[in-house]
Image (spheres, rainbow, N blue to C red):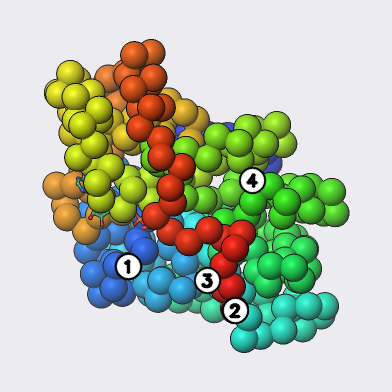
């Protein structure tokens, strides 16, 4: 089993740098997929209330037979615009959503709870953040963070709240490396976590420059891309339901990308996202 490096977060918690994501995995399929992942050696699992697979994910965690404290389980708050997230009502709603996720997962604590999107964009995310941070008080969540936040929203949290997110989970891959956001986060002790780290398995994985690097190292392009994340200090959470790929995506130690490889990977950047821009999208 390969040894995956870890990242120490700004509150001292430690997260494996490679985790297993389960977006678009139906609940029933989540159980065998997450079990395969844990058996392969993944110790970090990333789900979300909106993925509707917390029950299946939790079942796999229960069945896997790995001590709870060796696992790092993340889920996310879906702060949809159909509810009032301001004031006391918002704080109660956050607690209700958190309790529901914990119950579905069958867990008595979470390692990490994230705000899924910074919405409503110009209103209540600070209130939601204070409510999420308040969950730390009773010990049922060890770390809190955000997802899809941009520099303006992070600046608000840093200025207005006493709790700084441990990480920000955003779209990040060689086509869209998020350098400016990563630099900002590094200055403020906020780790970078990549969603769609493999570019959702699209054309990135047949990009000629990356194919060449993969051939040079006798690895697959997916492994080269995940190695790039690790060497960039980024936490990555690739998804697959195919057992061989689940194992392949974890086997990214034992080789090193050199300066020439890293320069070639930097050159494939297009600045084009696969997903929507969280700064310009109406999530309500
Ligand atoms: P990804 O980049 O992990 O790509 C997954 C796809 O790549 C798979 O469905 C498969 O088609 C392909 N693939 C995986 N391994 C492969 C391999 N070794 N060889 C060839 N193809 C391979 O994309 P993702 O699922 O969008 O992102 C990963 C995780 O990030 C999600 O499961 C989820 O947990 C998280 N995520 C979070 C957000 C958010 O808003 N916070 C958004 C999207 C995803």
Single out the mark in the foreground, 3 or 4.
4
Q: Which residue is mark 2?
A: 284
**The disc label shown at residue 166, or none:** 4
When asked about the image quadrant of residue 55, the answer is bottom left
User: Which mark's residue is nearer the viewer, 3 or 2?
Assistant: 2
Q: Residue, x 54% and y 78% (percent of image)? A: 100
Give the secondary structure at mark 1: loop
| Chain-order first, disc 4 or disc 2 | 4
Mark closest to the chain's N terminus, 1 or 3: 1
Residue assigned mark 1: 24
Q: Earlier in the sequence, mark 4 or mark 1?
A: 1
- Of badges 4 and 1, the one in the foreground is 1
Residue 196 position in % (x across, y down)? 38, 51
148, above or below 252, in the image: below
Q: Which mark is residue 93?
A: none
Q: Nearer the viewer, residue 245 or 1?
A: 245
Question: What is the x, y in percent for residue 158?
Answer: 79, 47
Q: Is residue 158 visible?
A: yes
The N terminus lies in quadrant: top left
- Whether tag 3 and tag 2 are in contact, CB under 8 A, the answer is no
Q: Residues within 10 Å of mark 2 (few under 14, many from 20)?
A: few
Query: Which mark sits nearer the N-terminus, 3 or 2?
Result: 3
Task: Kindly identify which residue carries mark 3.
Answer: 102
């Amino acid at each position: 089993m390969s040894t995956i490096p870890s990242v120490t977060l700004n509150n001292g918690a430690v997260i494996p740098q490679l985790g297993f994501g389960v977006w678009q995995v139906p609940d029933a399929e989540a159980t065998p997929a997450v079990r395969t992942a844990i058996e392969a050696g993944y110790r970090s699992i990333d789900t979300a209330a909106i993925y509707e697979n917390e029950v299946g994910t939790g079942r796999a965690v229960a069945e896997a037979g790995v001590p709870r404290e060796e696992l790092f389980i993340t889920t996310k708050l879906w702060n949809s615009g159909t509810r009032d997230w301001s004031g006391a009502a918002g704080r109660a709603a956050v607690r209700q959503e958190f309790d529901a996720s914990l119950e579905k997962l069958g867990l008595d604590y979470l390692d990490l709870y994230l705000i899924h999107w910074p919405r409503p964009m110009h209103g209540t995310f600070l209130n939601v953040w204070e409510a999420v941070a308040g969950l730390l008080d009773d010990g049922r969540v060890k770390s809190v963070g955000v997802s899809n936040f941009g520099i303006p929203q992070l600046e608000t949290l840093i200025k207005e709240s006493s709790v700084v997110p441990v990480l920000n989970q955003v779209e990040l891959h060689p086509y869209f490396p998020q350098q400016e956001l990563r630099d900002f986060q590094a200055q403020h002790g906020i780790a970078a976590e990549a969603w769609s780290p493999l570019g959702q398995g699209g054309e990135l994985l047949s990009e000629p420059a990356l194919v060449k690097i993969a051939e040079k190292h006798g690895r697959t392009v997916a492994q080269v891309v995940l190695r790039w994340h690790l060497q960039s200090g980024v936490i990555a959470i690739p998804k697959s339901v195919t057992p061989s790929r689940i194992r392949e995506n974890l086997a990214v130690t034992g080789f090193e990308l050199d300066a020439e490889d890293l320069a070639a990977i930097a050159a494939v950047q297009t600045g084009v996202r696969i997903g929507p821009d969280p700064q310009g999208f109406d999530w309500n």
